[in-house]
Image (spheres, coloured by chain):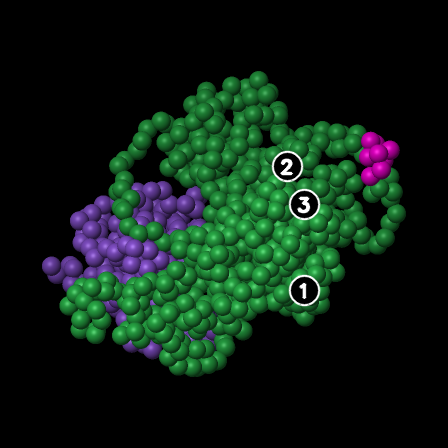
Chain colours: A green, B purple
Amino acid sequence: MKKTKSAQKKQLLSGNEAIARGAYEAGVRVASGYPGTPSTEILENFSLYKESYSEWAPNEKVALEVALGASFAGVRALATMKHVGLNVAADPLFTSAYTGVRGGLVIITADDPEMHSSQNEQDNRNYAFAAKVPMLEPADAAEAKEFMKTAYDMSEKFDTPVLLRTTTRVSHVKGLVPIGRVKTSKGKPGIEKMPQKFVMLPANARKRRVVIEQRMQDLTEFAETFSENRIERGDNKIGFITSGISYLYVKEAFPEASVLKLGMVYPFPEKMIRHFARSVKKLYIVEELDPFIELHVKAMGIECTGKQRVPAYGELDSLKVRQAITGKKGKKLYEAESIPLRPPNLCPGCPHRGIFHSISKLGLFVAGDIGCYTLAALKPLSALDTCVCMGASIGTAFGMEKALGKDSLGKIVAVIGDSTFMHSGITGLLDIVYNGGFSTVIILDNRTTGMTGHQPNPATGMTLSGETGTTVDIEALCRAIGVKHVYDVNPHDIKATEKVLRRETAREEPSVIITKSPCVLLPEMKKRKNKPLYGVITENCTGCRMCLKIGCPAIEWVPLNEKEALSLGLKPKQKGHSRINPVLCDGCSQCAPLCKFNAINLVKDRDG
Amino acid sequence: MDKKVKNIIICGVGGQGILLASEITSTALIEAGYDVKQSEVHGMAQRGGSVIAHLRYGEKVYSPLIEPGTADIEVAFEMLESVRYLPYLHKGSSVIVNTHKIYPPSVATGNEKYPSDILSRLTAKKLNLLPLDAFAIAEKLGETRVVNMVLVGALSSFLPVPEKTFLKVIERRLPAKILKVNLDAFLKGKAAAEKRKEEQEQR
């Protein structure tokens, strides 16, 4: 390969960075979304283009509505979310297919096969079929950027929202992307009243329903000549129909085979599929998760092999594809060795640890939610008993209470983060108050959206573009809903926290406990000066292991034999002592009151 | 230029600077004229958990994921992690291991032991082993946060990229305030790897 100096600049970009760049080159003016792995970096990167408006919405439904509104106003608009976010936004999605658009509208759904950072691995291609909206699926970052521009052209040409689906290995894979120029949008921003198009009363909606049918037919025709639906002619003994990341695995595993690559996964280019199927001796469909393409191809009466061989869950890779198709095991690999696991953990100094320690001590059933604090389910805290979806903690806790009646008093709590409460917790709390419950809801206010990498939310008073916004007062909000008992606690103060928790869970009225302490990974927390350092006075340590129960990564167990114990002035039978790793200790002080023997003490105030 | 696609696994513990290390390596390979795909996972994988990044380079790279049994090089930022991803390696794979230990929760709390035989387990697998105390090198430079750059330096001695290309990429990527110590770390890492390689050849 020669090093060519092409006129076009290329950059190493992740799929998400490329999508942001594509939106910029397509002239997007308004972008909204809610953070969620693997979609988060799209808006973070798009917000760097200061000529456009971008925001974090409280949830995905609002994000899509904001984008749809911008489209109604005639500008190009973008909504971004992870796969489960599209469930939240499904309501506007289905009807936006009826209204169509004025300015181009693209909705990103970032799916997470293998559940690297998700509670399920649903296949959102099914939404394209169900909502009657076309869907593009890029295979890598370079395609992701180009497909964004195509998506906006399609959206305006066919008067439809367009879904663009990525998966984790498209969103978070970096590759070379040619950088293009910005296209100025042809749309004319302004207010235009179009009730027959925008007011989905039954009489109008019935007419628009017919429009959708015609649109899907037009799109099916378009799919036949769309350049990103392409046949790569190779050996005609076997042929593959594939799309997205699976295409790359097929090319890696079977470089010589014929491939029909679908850049648009819905609607299908039926003529092209028939033509391709006839041209190969054996037809395989390779796709991650559901048999979406396969079912359609089979419904066309074409014989093919798909999920019969290719796994229907989890991620694929080229080895899995090769093994599935050839049925051969391949060469023997080194076996995985048995070594200690290394699961993710709450950070040293994490304010969540304090409240979960108290919850664990009281033996409460915890209806949990989505965020860093879901990690409290792991040992040794083991203080989270359900995790379903964003906001579910409050409704499920209330449902359990209604099912069990007064017997459940003092036994159940709902735990939800500040960002998750803003997302979809407020309505759950309304239900408790409205329908006369006595649930206790704990809102973990750490001033950020932690797990996805510290995005601001309405309760933090910052916006995506870094401006100071209006801070939602969570306490006042809860009171306005009708909760009479709302209490702030400092979760690092374990004793005070426990006291409030005991009192409020026993109360026969709804109550909210807000734990107020910022995430230790926030820049202002990392930079703070005079961070205290705690240490263990070894001769006071009896080896009771109480301090290990909070699961702080900074507290370590040092095993001792008889001789070592004696040399440290400890009882010969003592099996070990605790130690605080000074590199990891964040100085939160939660561990100190847990030690009944005064072995944990402030060592020094140090410069941070 | 070698047309065949080469595979590098970079693994360690969330928070060790693995993403930056793999980004700098990828950029340097691109500067040297290669096609590159680099895969990583965000979100739940951080927070002190085990982290793996895949890096593939060659004339044309399709899949971003390395097939088990095909990694040519593994860079383990932490000793225990070098063993976790063994199924990706093959006989003769080069393995750069930072011998510094970070205890996983079960070890820190005394419920499990940190295996004492990691290096001998790897040697028994007929891997081309290159142990390196990157933490100690970084500590000597007075900045323990440059462990990742020490390891990029060590990795660079296995790659068809000129030293000056790496230095240029690091200069472009890092803020001036921390640049010098990172460049020093890179060079120390490279020198240490080359010294080890020489010693091994003499044996």
Q: Earlier in the sequence, mark 2 or mark 3?
A: 3
Residue at the disc numbered 3: A89
A459 sits to left or right of B163: right
In the displayed structure, would residue A296 be above or below residue B100?
A: above
Q: Position of residue A35 (x, y in %)?
A: 59, 55
Q: Chain of mark 3?
A: A
Measure the C-alpha gap from mark 1 to mark 3. Answer: 27 Å
A563 sits to left or right of A241: left
Residue at the disc numbered 2: A127
Q: Earlier in the sequence, mark 2 or mark 1?
A: 2
Query: Are marks 1 and 3 in one subunit?
Result: yes
Label 1 CA crowd tier, 10 Å (few <14, some 14–19, many 20+):
some
Q: Image quadrant of residue A488?
A: bottom right
The type of residue carrying mark 2 is: Tyr
Which mark is nearer the camera, 1 or 3?
1
Q: Position of residue A14 (x, y in %)?
A: 51, 54
- Can residue B180 be seen? no
Q: Residue at x 32, y 45 (%)?
A: B88
Q: Chain of mark 2?
A: A
Residue range in magenta is: A200-207
Label 3 CA crowd tier, 10 Å (few <14, some 14–19, many 20+):
some
Q: Residue at x 37, y 70 (%)?
A: A596
Q: Image quadrant of residue B23?
A: bottom left
Give the number of the disc on residue A475: 1
Which mark is nearer the camera, 2 or 1?
1
CB atoms of marks 2 and 1 within 8 Å: no
The type of residue carrying mark 3 is: Ala
